[in-house]
Amino acid sequence: MAKRIGGAGKSGGGDSNILARISNSEIVSQGRRAAGDAVGVSKKLIWSTGKAAWIAGTTFLILVVPLIIEMDREAQLNELDLQQASLLGAPASPAQRGM
Amino acid sequence: MADLFPPLVTAQIDDKPKVDEKVDYSNLPCPVPYEELHREAYMSLKPDTFEGLRFDFTKGLNQKFGLCHSVMMGPTEVPSQSPDTVIKIPTAHYEFGANYIDPKLMLVGRVMTDGRQSARVRADLTDKLMVKANAQLANEPHMSQAMFNFDYMGSDYRAQLQFGNNALVGANYIQSVTPRLSLGGEVFWVGVPRKSGIGYAARYETDKMVASGQVASTGLMAMNYVQKVSDKVSLATDFMYNYFSREAVASVGYDYMLRQSRVRGKIDSNGVASALLEERLSMGLNFLMSAELDHKKKDYKFGFGLTVG
C-alpha cells in the first residue's frame, strides 16, 4: 500500500541528522496521516455507538421495564393465590385480593 | 382485565357461530361497524398518551346518570412552520361533564374552562336503526363542528349515512362475505374544499388473529394485523402508506392486560417509542403513566394521571 513517490522525502535538507530524515520520510508521514484518520474514525465510531446506546437504552427503559415490573407483580400475585388456595383448600375470591 | 376506559360508543357484539364444516351462507354474522374495522389494532397501536397531569373523577349519581370532573395541566403543541421544531405552550383547564347512559339512549356532554363544549348523542330508534350525533363548539369562529350519522344494521351487513357541517356527506357499507371475512366500501363528498373520495376495506378475523386493510382515494393505504397470543397478551403491527406523497410508516406494538394493570407499548419507523401504563391501585382508583420518545425530533413527552371512579 505504501506508494513511493519518487523518493521525495529522503533528500530534503542536506546534512540533517538521521532522526530528522526519518521523521520527514514518506512512510512516516503516511503513517501519521493514517493514525489521524484512525483517530477520526474511531471518534466517530465511539460517538455513533454512544448515540445508538442512548437510543436503545431509553427505548428499552420505556418499552420493556414497566412490562417486566408488572409481570413480576402478576407472578407474585399468582404465587399468593396459589399459597392461599393450598392453605384454605379453595381458590381465593376476588374480594380478598386487594393490596 | 376489561377496558379501563370503555369507548363512548359501544360496538354491537357480533356472535360468531361455532366452527363447523359447512358454512351456512344464509346465516352469516353481522360485521363490525365500518369505523371500527381497525379497532383491535388501534387499541394497541394508538394508546392515548398525553403530556402533563391528568386527573379524572367520575361520580355516578344514579344507575344511568353520572357526572365527571377532570383537570388537565400540561404543555400543548402549537403547529410551527418548520417540521423540526416543536412549540409547546403550557395550558391548564378543567372540564365538567355529564353522562346519561341507557341501553337505548346515551347522552354525553362536556364543557371546558376555555369555552369549548362538546356533546354526543346515541339513540337506538328501532332495533336496527341507530342515530348518532356529535357536536363541538368553540369560542373562535369557524372552529365548531357537528356530525350526524344514521346507521342501519341488517342481518349480515351494516350501512351508514353521515352528514357534517361544511357540507360533508358520506356513506359506507360493510357486508359479511364468509363467517370470517367482511368487505366494505365508503364514499364521501366534502363541500369546502370540493373533494370527493371513495375507499374500500376488508377485514378477516379468526379466534386468534385479526387482519384488516383499507385503501382510499385520498392516497391512504393501511394494513394491520393483530395476533392474540393469549387472552392477556396481544401483539399488533401496522403499515400505512400514502401513495401520493410516497411516505410509509410501519409500527409494532404490544398490549398486556394483566389483572392489576394494563401495559401498552409501541415503536414506530419514524423513531417514536411510546408506552402507556394503567395500574389499578385499589377499587376504582387507577394510576396512569404515559411516555413518548421521538428520537428524530428529540421531543420527549411524559405524563401521569389518576382516575377515580
Image (tube, coloured by chain):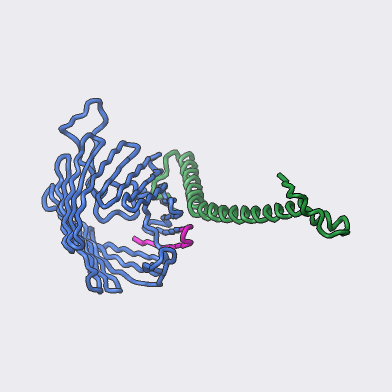
Q: Colour of chain B?
A: blue
- The image position of residue B293, as x and y in percent, is 46, 58
Q: Is residue B90 left or right of residue A57?
A: left
Residue drawn 25% across the image and 74% down it = B140
Q: Is residue B103 left or right of residue B244?
A: left
- The image position of residue B82, as x and y in percent, is 41, 66
Magenta segment boundaries in residue numbering: B293-309
Displayed quadrant of residue B71:
bottom left
Q: Nearer the viewer, residue B35 or B18?
A: B35
- The image position of residue B1, as x and y in percent, is 37, 48
Residue B303 drawn in magenta:
yes
Q: Nearer the viewer, residue B166 or A43?
A: A43
- In the orientation shown, which residue stands out farthest toward the left? B126
Q: Colour of chain A?
A: green
Residue drawn 44% across the image and 66% down it = B85
The dominant secondary structure in magenta is strand
Residue drawn 27% across the image and 46% down it = B215
Residue drawn 40% across the image and 72% down it = B89
Residue B302 drawn in magenta:
yes
